[in-house]
């Protein structure tokens, strides 16, 4: 992108740059489930220009509109001017949060994300009592509510909790006798809910004789807060993580992340977020070169592909979903496919690039009807492939796709590519 963030956040300049060609509309996730010009990329840009020029009040109606974007970046991908709709929506959500405040349950959630010790306690308590309120489906790390409550319907699948988090299950330095060393940034969902991802990553590093540093002082990347406009949490977590990465960066070859959203947040969104804090922006840029999605680094910097080629082929069929934060934001889509295809038969769904409909905390709570409507076509697409497994290097996609497959009665099982690769290495 040639534009500087400070120009991008000038909404009226971005609005003036829109040529109203409408190319973004057919691919827009929210417009596809709510066909109204105001909830389309072109509409959002127009309204943001009007807001900056003083012609639009940030009232409840405007709040409702700006909170309807899934931040999927489909529009940015096809826009001839590459107008960053997602970034300006993220920015205006901070104004919304300041004007209207943030709902108590979101504030409570973001408070947990700011303090890992508190998060550890909350998730441990959650694990202890989860069977009281939920029916556990251990085979897919998910659970259904036993009661029909406003945001906890009995037919909706949620990720279930683990007794001990991934980071608390291992020592910080794991010596695999290698001459190489990487740090792992695990992400909250893989730490507390989908623990097999981290376990698989450790198995892969062991097979490659690469030492692992678990970077236990890492905090949530801040993405859930960023997408909700809670910039205080983003500021606190981003500065902590940058300082922490600087403290050990020289000792590791890379910081690898088996999660598209965390990786995109650390590598791309930190720089955008710090557009008006030059010192921190420079520090965010300086750490970027060490940050990789796990499959990206394993594919390009190790002999994993050759190692997998020496292992048996599994008969299971895998289809791969492209997380928005992997393909569209980081250009990562070949790497997971290259690695998975060494040991599994792959079949492509009709449009792997279509957003799963996760959309962030607000979309998963107050606006869940949109997330559900966007997710069901994805589940149908997966069903049509007749694949045994659907894979994506993103646990937010996993949470949403598992829920969507639950509604559509799709029996395909979700696995992160790291879990599939680790399974292949065991054979
Ligand atoms: S980011 Fe996605 S949902 Fe939001 S305007 Fe763009 S295409 Fe539509
Ligand atoms: S594709 Fe870009 S330029 Fe065209 S209407 Fe959409 S935002 Fe405007």
Image: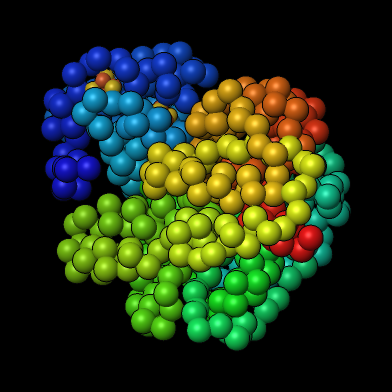
Which residue is found at the position 73% from the left and 33% from the top? 387
Camera sees residue 219: no
Which residue is found at the position 54% from the left and 64% from the top? 303
Residue 329 image position (x, y, % from top left): 38, 44
Give the side of residue 154 with respect to residue 38, left or right. Answer: right
Place residue 162 in its image quadrant: bottom right
Residue 343 image position (x, y, % from top left): 69, 49
Give the side of residue 218 with respect to residue 382, left or right. Answer: left
Q: Quadrant of the N terminus?
A: top left
Residue 278 image position (x, y, % from top left): 17, 64
Which residue is found at the position 77% from the left and 37% from the top? 388
- 107 or 8: nearer the eye? 8
Residue 331 image position (x, y, % from top left): 40, 44
How many numbered circles are shown? 0
- 200 or 72: nearer the eye? 200
Which residue is found at the position 35% from the left and 37% from the top? 86
Q: Quadrant of the C terminus?
A: bottom right
Q: Quadrant of ligand 1?
A: top left
263 over 23 or under it: above or below: below
Camera sees residue 147: yes
16 over 119 or under it: above or below: above
Place residue 233 in its image quadrant: bottom left
- 74 or 106: nearer the eye? 74
Give the side of residue 144 with respect to residue 384, left or right. Answer: right
Color style of the picture: rainbow
Give the side of residue 315 with respect to residue 270, left or right. Answer: right
């Amino acid at each position: 992108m040639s534009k500087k963030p400070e120009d991008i956040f000038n909404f009226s300049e971005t609005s003036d740059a829109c040529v109203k060609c409408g190319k973004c509309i057919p691919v827009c996730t929210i417009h596809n489930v709510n066909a109204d010009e105001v909830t389309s990329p072109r509409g959002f840009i127009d309204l943001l220009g009007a807001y900056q020029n003083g012609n639009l009040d940030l009232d409840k109606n405007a709040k409702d509109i700006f909170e309807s974007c899934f931040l999927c970046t489909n529009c940015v991908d096809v826009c001839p001017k590459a107008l960053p709709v997602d970034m300006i929506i993220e920015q205006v959500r901070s104004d919304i949060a300041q004007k209207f405040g943030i709902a108590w349950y979101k504030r409570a959630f973001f408070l947990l994300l700011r303090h890992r010790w508190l998060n550890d306690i909350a998730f441990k308590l959650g694990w202890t009592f989860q069977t009281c309120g939920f029916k556990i489906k251990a085979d897919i790390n998910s659970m259904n509510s036993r009661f029909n409550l406003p945001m906890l319907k009995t037919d909706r699948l949620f990720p279930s909790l683990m007794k001990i988090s991934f980071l608390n299950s291992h020592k910080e330095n794991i010596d695999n006798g290698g001459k190489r060393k990487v740090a792992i940034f695990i992400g909250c969902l893989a730490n507390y809910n989908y623990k097999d991802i981290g376990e698989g990553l450790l198995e892969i590093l062991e097979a490659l004789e690469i030492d692992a540093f678990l970077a236990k002082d890492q905090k949530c990347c801040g993405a859930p807060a960023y997408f909700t406009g809670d910039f205080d949490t983003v500021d606190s977590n981003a500065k902590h993580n940058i300082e922490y990465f600087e403290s050990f960066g020289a000792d590791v070859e890379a910081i690898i992340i088996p999660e598209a959203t965390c990786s995109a947040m650390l590598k791309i969104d930190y720089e955008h977020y710090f557009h008006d804090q030059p010192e921190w922006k420079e520090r965010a840029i300086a750490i970027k070169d060490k940050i990789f999605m796990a499959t990206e680094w394993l594919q390009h910097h190790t002999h994993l592909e050759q190692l997998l080629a020496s292992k048996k082929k599994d008969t299971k069929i895998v289809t791969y979903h492209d997380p928005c934060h992997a393909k569209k934001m980081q250009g990562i889509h070949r790497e997971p496919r290259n690695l998975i295809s060494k040991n599994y038969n792959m079949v492509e769904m009709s449009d792997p690039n279509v957003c799963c409909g996760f959309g962030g905390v607000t979309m998963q709570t107050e606006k869940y009807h949109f997330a559900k409507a966007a997710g069901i076509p994805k589940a149908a697409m997966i069903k049509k492939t007749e694949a045994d497994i659907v894979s994506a290097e993103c646990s937010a996609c996993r949470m949403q796709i598992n829920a969507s497959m639950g509604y559509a009665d799709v029996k395909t099982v979700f696995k992160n590519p790291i879990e599939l690769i680790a399974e292949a290495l065991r054979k």
